[in-house]
Image (cartoon, rainbow, N blue to C red):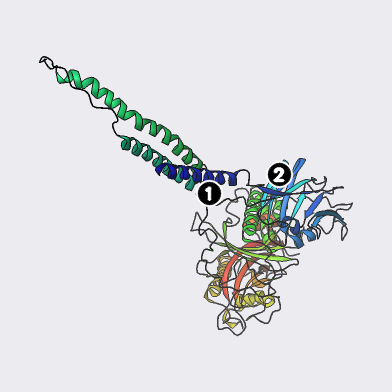
Amino acid sequence: MRFVWAVVAFVLATVLIGAGIAQRTIFMGPTEQRMELTVDQPTPYVLVDADVLRAHTGLQTLLVRGKGDVFVAYARTDDMKSWLSDTAYDYVSLTKSGKPKTARVEAEQPPADGGETSGRSPVGSDLWLDSFADKDSLVANLQLTKGNSVLIARDGVKPAPTDILVSWALDTRTPWAGPLMAAGGLLLAVGIVLYILGIRHQRRGRGPRRKGPGPLPETQPITMPERAEIDQPGDAGTAQRTMTTPRRRLAIALPALALTGLLATGCTADSWPQFGGDAPSPTPSPSVVAPENQKQPVVTDKQGQRIVADVASTLAKADTDLDDKLAETRLTGAALDARRLEYQLRGKIEGREGALMTPLGKVKILLPEATEGWPRTVLALTVDEKDAKKPPVLLTMVQSDPWANYRVTSMADMLAKSTFPNVAPAWLGTTRVPAESAFLSLPPSELAGAFSDFVDADDKSQYATDFDEASKEFAKSVRDSRAAFVKKAADAGAGQTSAVAFKMAASDDEPLSLATLDSGAVVSVSVTDTQTITPTNPDAVIKITDEPSKALTGVSEAAKGYTTTYGIQLFFAVPAQGSNEQIRLLAYKQDLLSVQVIK
């Protein structure tokens, strides 16, 4: 009976192992699904619609081949169409039958540079969520969601590559191959054990079959040899016989078990069931719920980190080379004016040193505007993770149109005592508050003028109670600096022959305001602080003694006096209308803007 069960175990083991191997070989099927995209008359740009990339489920692998530079980027479909609106391009979409088709789309508006295409390179645009570049061929593994498309190009002038292949990985997992082969191996081992036991039982059951010996002849007594002479050969023969059979059985069993082990260990994780792999892991629920008609934020967190890093590297190079043209690619408004003047001073004053600005670190808080149009605004708070003593830097960036990169409008060191307000996460974004909004305790358009009045008039200002303690401390430092300058002039003997006037006013830059979660807003404004020195005696002449003023004016004295203008970039947290909170100063930065002789 043991032989019967051994045969059954061998048969079942063969079936199970064979079924497991077959699942990983002849029954496995293709590993991917492919779709070739064709372009008959290539233009410098090829836009592959999101529906093409999502024609099948799974991760998308994009293969683009063509001699020379190859560039691939993905972004929101609407953003890409806006970027391509002034040029012709090839648009690859999906038909109702699921087949790709290519159509030529003409420019909606005249290109900026004239000609059939604008010749604009897509490399380095802040509009892309991500981009890739390579030579001759490029492979990009993507996981694009609905509403995102891919742009394929070279440099914006040469025709884009036309050898384009999209593939999707198919599910080739065989979760029962491993268990089948393991079960077959187990049955094979059981069969071998049953077979060995059957042979052993059969041999024991037969017993000795030989007849007994006849009567022995009468013999003479003999002398018995020593035991060692009799036992030695007999024992050796017995030991040889008793050990030969187990060794033969073991020689049969070991290869079978080794083969089974090899099959089982050769299986990958795809050959075994993944228990609990699809179960969702618990995640904290977001504390912010997006409104129904909420638009997408203009940048993602990863995109924002990349943009700020590029701004930092560009400004570092511009500062080293004192290149205001390079700085202009990433700065505008008050931030650019201050940098440009400092470059002039460093070119004229030998040995003028010191950091132009606290270096930008890693983005800790990113607050992008959620909109579909332009201009677009992003606020970021960066911190230096290596040096905790360096203050965080608060900055606002604006993208004026689809073809422009983000440029910093305001940038200031955050106060140590300040607490940043509660804002929406980057994946949700926020809305821009209109300059004339009545939903804040003070409209953004009036904030710069109100603070200027508070600095000049002190407690006599009607806005004195609207600002917090940090704002009052900064205003006091400005007034103390003014008083120190007047005292220094008087000590030098100029008090009887000259007069000094100070005036702070709102600049011409438009305020930027982004809403917070408590219905307030973070508002960025800039003001100018003007200091005018004029003679009180017609025979008196105002001497210009400080190096920056002499370098900028090119003279050492002025008959009618001169004016020095400082620019101050300010960030405030403005509460909602009806709130009992005060307007809080978050960050500021003061720079010299100009020195002019009165004529």
Cα gap from disc 1 to disc 2, whole angstroms: 29 Å
In the displayed structure, does residue 328 sit left or right of residue 171? Answer: right
Report the residue at 34% width, 35% height from top.
203
Q: Quadrant of residue 497?
A: bottom right
Q: Is the residue marked by circle 2 packed among few (<14), some (14-19), or many (20+) residues within 10 Å? A: some
Position in image of residue 260 (x %, y %): 48, 41
Q: Quadrant of residue 424?
A: bottom right
Q: Position of residue 139 (x, y in %)?
A: 69, 45
Nearer to us in this view, 130 or 585: 130
Residue that numbered label 2 is attached to: 138
Q: Amino acid at mark 1?
A: Ala
Element under label 1? Answer: helix
Q: Name the residue type under label 2.
A: Leu
In this rendering, the label closer to the viewer, 1 or 2: 1
Which residue in the protein does label 1 denote? 269
Front residue (pair 73, 28): 28
Q: Quadrant of the C terminus?
A: bottom right
Residue in the picture at 38% in, 34% down: 250
Residue extending farthest to the right is 115
